[in-house]
Image (cartoon, rainbow, N blue to C red):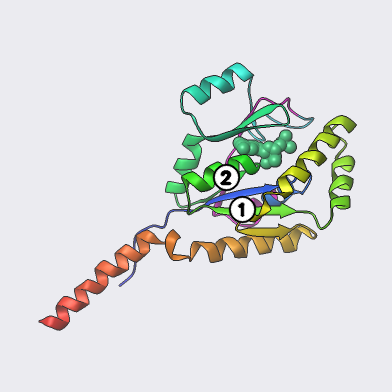
Amino acid sequence: MANTMQNKGILIVLSGFSGAGKGTLVKKLLETYDNYALSVSMTTRAPREGEQDGVHYFFSSREQFEEKIQADGFIEYAQYCDNYYGTPKAYVEEQLAAGKNVILEIEIQGALQIKKLFPESLLLFVTPPTAAELERRLKSRGTETEEVIAKRLARASEESEGIEAYDYIVVNDNLETCVEELHQIVKAARAVPVRREAFIKEIREELKGFVKGAQN
Ligand code: 5GP
């Protein structure tokens, strides 16, 4: 008998040093596969050139952000290099219920909050192959001042201390290979029993029907 119960999607946390290429990676993953949804965060940092409100982030003032904290509107939030960043609740809940794998592209403090709240979430850490490559990518982006780059590299050093909290490390050397690897990890993770509770419950119920049949 076919199992009809729809599987909920899984919550995927994607962290990595600033400049690791997470943005490009996620964009490619969403273009290639249709069962992913990306959560758009809210931040108090100023938009970079080319960033659009509601697409890359919901840009807000500190006051607006703090109001949303008070209203319990975030799944998690954190301060990063002098700004607030947070994940609005509603979209994530909707998309998970619709069976999508929801990606949160967030830093480590947020990742740890998510793991605590949702132990069945999948934590992935993206890193460039070397530290020198990270510095090169941050500089070549040309969107940040020397001072901001220095702050972000210092923050990367701090974040590297927390990598063990993640389920998988993905080295972003080649974009295509990396996207494929991510997708395979997610597919495998969805098959772990703790993430298939609805399926397990349903098949158990169905099998009980056979036990009764054999007793008659
Ligand atoms: P950026 O300023 O480069 O866009 O982001 C800085 C850092 O904040 C990145 O590591 C990014 O993943 C993280 N970030 C973005 N949105 C959120 C969020 O909603 N929550 C948390 N905790 N971190 C976020």
Q: Does residue 50 show up?
A: yes
- Look at the numbered disc 2 and give the secondary structure of its residue: helix
Q: Are marks 2 and 1 in contact (CB under 8 Å)?
A: yes
- Based on the picture, tell me whether residue 115 belongs to the magenta stretch: no
Determine the residue located farthest toward the left in the rendered image.
216
Give the residue displayed 79% in from the left and 38% down from the top.
152
Q: Quadrant of the C terminus?
A: bottom left
Residue nearest the viewer, comparing 82 with 35: 82
Residue nearest the viewer, comparing 120 with 11: 120
Quarter-wise, where is residue 34 in the image?
bottom right
Question: Dot 1 corresponds to which residue?
Answer: 165
Binning the other alpha carbons within 10 Å of mark 1 as few (below 14), some (14 to 19) or many (20 upward) gives some
Residue 142 in picture, x, y percent from top left = 88, 36
**Which disc, if any, is residue 93?**
none
- From this view, report whether residue 73 is shown above or below residue 101: above
Rendering quadrant holding ligand 1: top right
Give the residue displayed 76% in from the left and 49% down from the top.
21
Q: Is mark 1 within 8 Å of ligand 1?
A: no
Quarter-wise, where is residue 179 in the image?
bottom right
Disc 2 marks a residue whose amino acid type is Leu
- From this view, report whether residue 59 is shown above or below residue 100: above
Disc 1 marks a residue whose amino acid type is Ala
Residue nearest the viewer, comparing 151 with 7: 151
- Look at the numbered disc 1 and give the secondary structure of its residue: helix
Residue 15 in picture, x, y percent from top left = 66, 47
- Based on the picture, tell me whether residue 37 belongs to the magenta stretch: yes
Question: Dot 2 corresponds to which residue?
Answer: 112
Left/right placement of residue 71 relative to residue 46 reads left
Point out the stretch of residues depicted in magenta. Answer: 27-47
